[in-house]
Amino acid sequence: MSSLRDFMKVYWPLIAVTVLGVSVAFMFMDPAPPKEIRFAAGSPGGAYHAYAERYQRLLQEQGVKVDLLDTAGSVENLRLLDDGEADVALVQGGLASDRDREQLRSLGGLFPEPFWVFVRSDSDVRGFEDLRAKRFAIGGQGSGTRTLALQLQGEFGGTWPASSQLTPSGTAAADALLAGEVDAAAFAASLEAPYVEKLLRSPDVRLVPFPRAEALARRQDALSAVTLLRGVVDIGKDIPSTDVPLVAPVAQLAVRKDLHPAIEALLIDSAVAIHGDGSLLSAAGTWPNPDATDLPLSGQARRYYKNGPTFLRRYFSFGWANFLDRAWVLAIPLLTLLFPLVRAAPPIYRWRVRRKIYVWYKDIRELEGRGRSSPTKEERERILKELEDLQEEIGTVEVPLSYTDDLYRLRSHVEFVKQLVLNPKGAHPSAVLGT
């Protein structure tokens, strides 16, 4: 216990400075990432919503709660991000405005979203331009499908009547087409969207090709030309029965530019896990793609695509990796403070322990001097009594085991002084005292 007290007496300044340094450094640490984010997920039943649910599961495994917001589609998703009502969203490429580019950042393109146009099997439609006089469902207001459909209608020119710009979208549009309530329906969605696969397999509808897909992709920066290969949906049933050229915008993961970098890294990790295996339209490793975006790429995403996950994220959980990544700012001030203190502490400790021993030598020297100069036996006896009292007090001194030799040397010196007082002239002590 005494050793602990000695240790605390010596090292308490070091401990106090360390605590103070840590407290000050914590004030300058980057803020911890939020435990909850809002994800604009698109319409329930759609591909975006299905992907958003997968992101939700992966992030919740890392302790981040994800609130899914049902929306009409990409346009509304962008608006929610701009207005601060959502933190992250899946959005269709080609829809970003100047305001979006100022407020938002992209974490990379995730997958191509072919622009599917289905018509009834008995329809006389051969190309997109033939839909002008048809009951054509192009998606609801605020959806990326509708925005892209209107752009393509403008590319083909002429006046498109209101009947060719109906609002059903997603599953509702697919059901309306199968029921014969509309003549055609458009969807900007992944191949995995349930209603797209349902329509591809239905004998009652067929897919409209885009023979001029390459030309459209050249004219629209947000579009790329893709080919749905023969039999890629179902080899046995030969679906589709021919290669089908299509145009496709690229879905991207958009975030507010003030989103915490740790959450961005977690989202990119999830994107790699969800989209990295490839699909029927692209090879494995194609996505996520930092170049397939129309929003500025975030700094965190740029570092990730260049160097991969950080060292800490490879070997630690999200919570620990983030804390350690933020805590590095503690190292410089603490090392600056602790290095000289740590070097000085052991000598100070040794001095404090030995001082408990050496402090007695002042009294011993004083008693020795008085004893050697005392002319009477009575005076020497009083000094001997003081030396015995001193010796008793020294016996209560506690020091670490490694300093015991110094303590016993002190006690032997007290005994030596007693002999000097007993025999100031060099005679035997018994003669001096008259015994």
Image: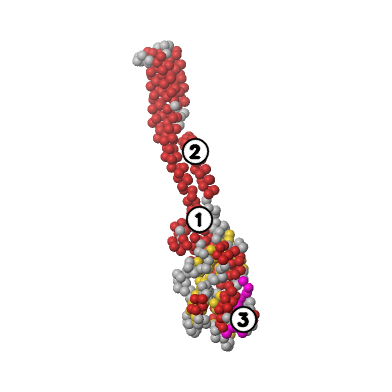
Asked if labels 1 and 3 touch by Cβ distance under 8 angstroms, the answer is: no
Mark yes or no: residue 72 visible: yes
Q: Earlier in the sequence, mark 3 or mark 2?
A: 2
Of the residues shown, which amino acid type is indicated by label 1? Asn
Chain-order first, disc 2 or disc 1: 2
Residue 6 on image: x %, y %: 47, 35
Circle on res. 12 = 2
SS type, badge 3: loop
Q: Quadrant of the C terminus?
A: top left
Q: Amino acid at mark 3?
A: Trp
Would you name the residue on which mark 1 appears? Answer: 322
Choose mark 2 or mark 1, whichever is in front.
Answer: 1
The CA span between labels 2 and 1 is 31 Å
Image coordinates for residue 298, horizontal then vertical, percent: 51, 62
* Residue behind mark 3: 160
Crowd class of label 2 (few under 14; some 14 to 19; many from 20; radius 10 Å): few
Q: Is residue 266 left or right of residue 70?
A: left
Residue at point 51% right, 78% down? Answer: 216
